Every structure is written in structure tokens, then in C-alpha cells.
Amino acid sequence: MKTRFSQDVVPISDLKINPGKIVNRAKDTHRPILLTSRGRGVAIVQGLAEYETHEEERAFVKAIAQGLMEVKEGKVLSLDKAKKKLGIKI
């Protein structure tokens, strides 16, 4: 999902004129569209599927980072204690 500045930067006035075209472009290309006002970025239009995927990936990476910090801080459980805490009986 690499942004192509020649195609993915659109003045906000274009969004006002034809919002469906901008939304469909974001959805079809799977790339976010940067909306600008007076030459400065003000918002992003992104397809829902890409947004959801991005949020899931971000949450996953955040959980991994949190787990690594807990290991570094010594907040660990033995396998037996973890199974007991999770209610796993194997």
C-alpha cells in the first residue's frame, strides 16, 4: 500500500465535486488518498477493508510489544500457572 503522490494527493475541492470518485479510487487501488487544502494535508480517505486490516495489524503489534515489555520486566508465568489461569486442562 505505497502512496503514489502523483495519483493519491487530491485537493479537498475535488472531494466536494465528486466524492464517489475519490472513495472508489481509494477502495479500488487499496491506497489511501491524501486530501489537501491550500497545499497542506488535512485528511485521509481510505477503503474500509484497508482500514480494518491496518487496525488489526496495529493491535497485534501493540500486543506483542506489551508482551515483550512484560517479559523484560519479569512479569512471566510458568507454563503450568498459565494453563491454570486460562483454565486449560491438559
Image: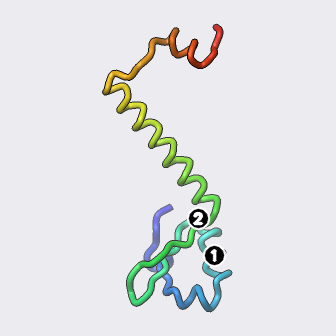
| Colouring style | rainbow
Which amino acid type corresponds to the residue marked 1 in the rendered image? Answer: Val
* Above/below status of 32 relative to 71: below
* Above/below status of 89 relative to 21: above
Residue at coordinates 54% horizontally, 52% vertically from top-left?
55
Q: CA distance from mark 1 to mark 2?
A: 11 Å
Q: Secondary structure at mark 1?
A: helix
> What residue is disc 2 on?
30
Residue at coordinates 64% horizontally, 83% vertically from top-left?
19
* Above/below status of 78 relative to 31: above
Image position, residue 50 (x, y; %): 59, 59
> What residue is disc 1 on?
23
Image position, residue 58 (x, y; %): 49, 48
Residue positioned most to the front: 85
Image position, residue 2 (x, y; %): 46, 64
Where does the C terminus fall, quadrant-wise?
top right
Comparing 24 with 16, the one in front is 16
Q: Which mark is residue 78?
A: none
